[in-house]
Image (spheres, rainbow, N blue to C red):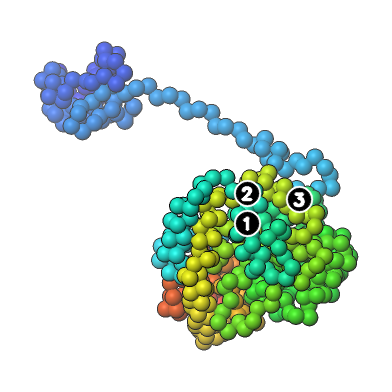
């Protein structure tokens, strides 16, 4: 073949000779092809590139050209559509179909993109966590005799005693079960107290993770509104009469998201109403150890004033330590304790002993009270700074209640501003906030957002986050005035 031979001709010759080589076998070098066909190196390169584009050869820089292995036909796409029927069919007409929607939980668990200020977090910033104390506690726990053996099913006796003392009243260690954090305890409690399809009364607004548990268990959450003094007793009594529910889930101390504390006069009323309805009260006492410096004396848990076993108490160390330090407790009195115990054993056997031993080491160390005092002071500073910045920079956002414990503020949006518009605009401006809709089990009365002041690095970041939120709100208000929609979020 002469130098003038076209790339097409050379490619055709090579194509016809490919059967001489095994699959994956190496073709002659470019220099050999140049000499054999008397063409230029450019012609050889282009011809090989054409065969490579056709999938007939593979070229590897520095190694040469090889006959390509035959492409295997892609496997047919799996058909999983049958699962839609299997997951939706409950077999009984009067049961509520189960749905598992974790979106209300993951929004506060997922880390925001780099550079975005985290007003959405539900845990302490690493700088507030007792990392050194936890590491030392875990190290000491791992060296304890028997630390890696099987623990008692109900939990280590010393740890159960510690939780019982924290509840107070007549609660004993024998009435406490150690759990893998508060979420696990809530799941066990709801499964124990209500069968699938049953109603369960919940505060409105309330913790989305609890609503997710209820719906995943096939329960029907029924809202009972709260105000600055907690759940409203008259509406609670109405809800029990209307639904026949046998359980109420509430957060009497620094309620999530409002920060409300159940008032002294309502505490006995709630227990009396539940007792008259033959119902349990699941007390989610999740942030008792995150009281602020100006909180004053805290009311005891409802379980401390409950001789009749109405209250199933849930407590946890997680919020005051780290999201990975998942140690909590269930406390109950009467036959329900045995049901709670049985469900927990079936679900998870027991909480790993090294983690229980580490919890004992931590709460028994001098570092523990120092940590709680430090966190109380820092949360107070942050709450004050965020509240002042909001009043100054974002007066349009109503803040009806400033809590003296916990880690969040609950803000009502002005009329005409939607949660979706503000949260997406905020993310575009570089700050992540949580919309209010997931906190309601029914239609919300207004738009809200929740701002956490615990997950950020400090007061400077709080101020910058408010500034960015101001930018987002200005964009939303401008768009509303001009009748256009804000640009899509990130």
Numbered disc 3: secondary structure: helix
Q: Earlier in the sequence, mark 2 or mark 1?
A: 2
Residue 464 visible at all: no
| Rendering coords of residue 233 (x, y %) | 81, 74
Viewer-closest of 291 and 433: 291
The residue that disc 2 covers is: 152
Numbered disc 1: secondary structure: helix
Viewer-closest of 276 and 461: 276
Q: Residue at x 14, y 29 (%)?
A: 41
The residue that disc 3 covers is: 339
Number of marks in picture: 3
Q: CA distance from mark 2 to mark 1?
A: 8 Å
Residue 410 visible at all: yes
Q: Badge 1, how many Cα within 10 Å: few under 14, some, many 20+?
A: some
Q: Are marks 2 and 1 in contact (CB under 8 Å)?
A: yes
Q: Badge 3, how many Cα within 10 Å: few under 14, some, many 20+?
A: some
Image-based side of 313 in relation to 151, left or right: right
| Rendering coords of residue 306 (x, y %) | 78, 68
Toward the front, the furthest residue is 145
Q: Earlier in the sequence, mark 1 or mark 3?
A: 1
Q: Residue at x 80, y 40 (%)?
A: 91
Quarter occupied by residue 404: bottom right
The residue that disc 1 covers is: 157
Q: CA distance from mark 3 to mark 2?
A: 17 Å
Q: Which quadrant holds the N terminus?
A: top left
Numbered disc 2: secondary structure: loop
| Rendering coords of residue 373 (x, y %) | 51, 77
Q: Badge 2, how many Cα within 10 Å: few under 14, some, many 20+?
A: few
Q: Residue at x 69, y 77 (%)?
A: 299
Quarter occupied by residue 38: top left
Q: CA distance from mark 1 to mark 3?
A: 19 Å
């Amino acid at each position: 073949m002469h130098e003038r031979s076209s790339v097409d001709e050379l490619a055709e010759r090579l194509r016809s000779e490919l059967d001489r080589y095994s699959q994956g076998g190496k073709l002659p070098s470019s220099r050999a092809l140049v000499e054999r066909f008397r063409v230029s190196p450019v012609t050889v390169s282009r011809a090989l590139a054409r065969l490579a584009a056709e999938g007939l050869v593979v070229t590897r820089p520095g190694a040469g050209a090889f006959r390509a292995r035959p492409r295997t036909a892609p496997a047919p796409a799996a058909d999983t559509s049958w699962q839609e029927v299997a997951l939706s069919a409950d077999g009984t007409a009067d049961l509520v179909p189960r749905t598992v929607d974790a979106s209300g939980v993951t929004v506060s668990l997922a880390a925001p993109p780099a550079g975005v200020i985290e007003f959405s977090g539900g845990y302490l910033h690493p700088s507030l966590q007792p990392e050194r104390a936890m590491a030392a506690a875990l190290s000491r726990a791992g060296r304890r005799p028997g630390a890696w053996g099987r623990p008692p099913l109900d939990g280590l006796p010393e740890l159960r005693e510690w939780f019982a003392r924290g509840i107070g009243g007549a609660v004993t260690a024998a009435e406490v079960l150690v759990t893998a954090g508060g979420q696990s305890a809530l799941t066990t409690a709801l499964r124990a107290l209500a069968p699938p399809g049953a109603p369960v009364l919940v505060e409105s607004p309330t913790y989305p993770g609890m609503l997710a548990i209820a719906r995943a268990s096939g329960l029907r959450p029924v809202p009972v509104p709260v105000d600055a003094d907690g759940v409203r007793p008259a509406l609670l009594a109405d809800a029990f009469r209307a639904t026949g529910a046998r359980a109420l889930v509430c957060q009497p101390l620094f309620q999530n998201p409002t920060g409300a504390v159940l008032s002294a006069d309502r505490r006995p009323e709630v227990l009396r109403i539940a007792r008259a309805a033959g119902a349990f009260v699941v007390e989610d006492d999740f942030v008792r150890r995150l009281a602020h410096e100006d909180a004053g004396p805290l009311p005891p848990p409802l379980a401390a004033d409950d001789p009749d076993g109405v209250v199933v108490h849930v407590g946890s160390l997680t919020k005051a330590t780290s999201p990975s330090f998942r140690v909590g407790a269930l406390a109950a009195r009467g036959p329900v304790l045995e049901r709670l115990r049985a469900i927990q054993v079936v679900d998870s056997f027991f909480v790993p002993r090294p983690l229980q031993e580490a919890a004992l080491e931590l709460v028994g160390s001098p570092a523990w009270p120092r940590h709680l005092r430090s966190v109380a002071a820092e949360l107070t500073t942050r709450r004050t700074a965020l509240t002042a910045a909001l009043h100054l920079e974002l007066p349009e956002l109503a803040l009806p209640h400033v809590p003296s414990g916990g880690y969040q503020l609950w803000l009502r949006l002005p009329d005409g501003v939607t949660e979706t518009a503000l949260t997406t605009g905020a993310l575009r401006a570089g700050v992540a906030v949580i919309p209010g809709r997931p906190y309601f089990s029914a239609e919300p009365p207004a738009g809200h957002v929740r701002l956490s002041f615990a997950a950020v690095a400090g007061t400077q970041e709080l101020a910058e986050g408010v500034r960015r939120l101001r930018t987002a709100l200005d964009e939303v208000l401008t768009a509303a005035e001009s009748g256009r929609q804000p640009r899509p979020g990130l």
